[in-house]
Amino acid sequence: MIAVLKPGVTLDERNKLTQWLEHQGVEVHVSEWKSKTILGLIGDTHKIDDELLSVLDIVESVNRISEPYKNVNRKFHQEDTIITVGDVKIGGGNFCVIAGPCSIESEEQIITVAKQIKEAGAHMLRGGAFKPRTSPYDFQGMQSDGLKLLVQAKKETGLPIITEIMSTEHLDLFDEVDIIQVGARNMQNFELLKALGKTKKPILLKRGLASTIKEFLMSAEYIIAGGNKDIILCERGIRTFETYTRNTLDLSAIPLLHELSHLPIVVDPSHATGIRSLVKPMSMAAVAAGTDGLMIEVHNDPKNALCDGPQSLTPEEFADAMVSINKVRAAVI
């Protein structure tokens, strides 16, 4: 439920109403948007009398939110959420490019790539330490040793780092990680989402392989319900009948998610297409559609990569893509 207060309401009047509502057993979130104060009510709001609330002198309007996701809802939180990591911001008009190898393979590899993507204009470094693989015989990542190398690359370049978590048992290893990524396979790992809701680190949540927009937002709701409001949504393609590409990049999800939610949205064209030559044009298309950022896989030797080589750009290809990405961004701002 949302209660919009009339202009000119004093802080004392607002606090008295908030206290009364909390005594009714609901949680009240206060936000300001376009000179209006919005009270978002979370919990069992059925006991709140709409008519009684709407006739109060300080209340302009009362509306119930029909969607099951409340905290992530644009109706509940009108202004864009901006995620800040050091000097990097994502959302609310701030654009961020995250780049790096799918999997960390060696100290030389991750540090070399980190320096090259920074020079090309990337804002954050990605690198997989724990790798979920379809086959149990495929490379599963360097795990804790990989995390140490990722942190070392962060210290040498100054780039904030993001990497994927697989289990709540690994949370203690992520102390020096700036953003924790939840992969597509774990989008509905609700115990993991609950645990991440209790952390104070931003979470990048990837859309599941065959998940609807509603299911995607409900997973984000799990994290916010736990207390963590710093969430970045990531569209990375969904499984369709098409087999030429690894997945089908749902570009329509970008403006739709902006309408439905206040959370920032980034796009991963590498996993969406699985084809190196498509990463640049789909990155440009995502920018034109209004994405808040991109996550692009970059490897110094894609032909010999231990994971996802066919979809990884070389550092030179990434630098070329950044030129086009920036041109499109300049045209649509």
Image (cartoon, grey):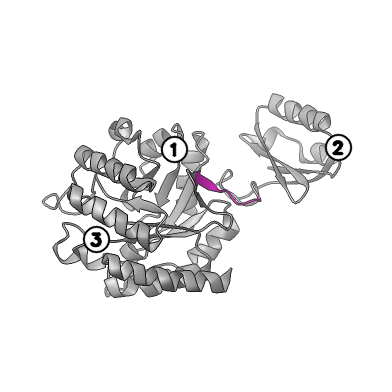
Tell me which amino acid carries mark 1. Lys
Which is more toward the observer, 47 or 185? 185
Horizontal side of residue 135 vs 27, given as left or right? left
List the residue tagged with mark 3: 299
Toward which corner of the image does residue 258 lie, by quadrant? Answer: bottom right
Q: Is residue 258 above or below residue 153?
A: below
Mark 1: which secondary structure?
A: loop
Tell me which amino acid carries mark 2. Leu
Which is more toward the observer, 293 or 44? 293
Q: Is residue 42 above or below residue 329?
A: above
The circle drawn on residue 201 is: 1
Horizontal side of residue 230 vs 173, given as left or right? right
In the rendered structure, does residue 238 fall within the stretch colored magenta? no
Mark 2: which secondary structure?
A: loop
Tell me which amino acid carries mark 3. His
* Cβ–Cβ under 8 Å for marks 1 and 2: no
Horizontal side of residue 52 vs 232, given as left or right? right
Question: Of marks 1 and 2, which one's residue comes earlier in the chain?
Answer: 2
- Quadrant in which the C terminus appears: bottom right
- Quadrant in which the N terminus appears: top right
Neighbour class for label 2 at 10 Å: few (<14), some, many (≥20)?
Answer: few
Determine the main secondary structure of the stretch shown in magenta.
Answer: loop
User: Residue at the spot x=22%, y=67% of the render?
Assistant: 310
Toward which corner of the image does residue 242 lie, by quadrant? Answer: bottom left
**Which is in the foreground here, disc 3 or disc 1?**
3
The circle drawn on residue 56 is: 2
Marks 3/1: CA–CA distance = 27 Å
Question: In x, y percent, where is residue 265?
Answer: 49, 56
Marks 2/3: CA–CA distance = 61 Å
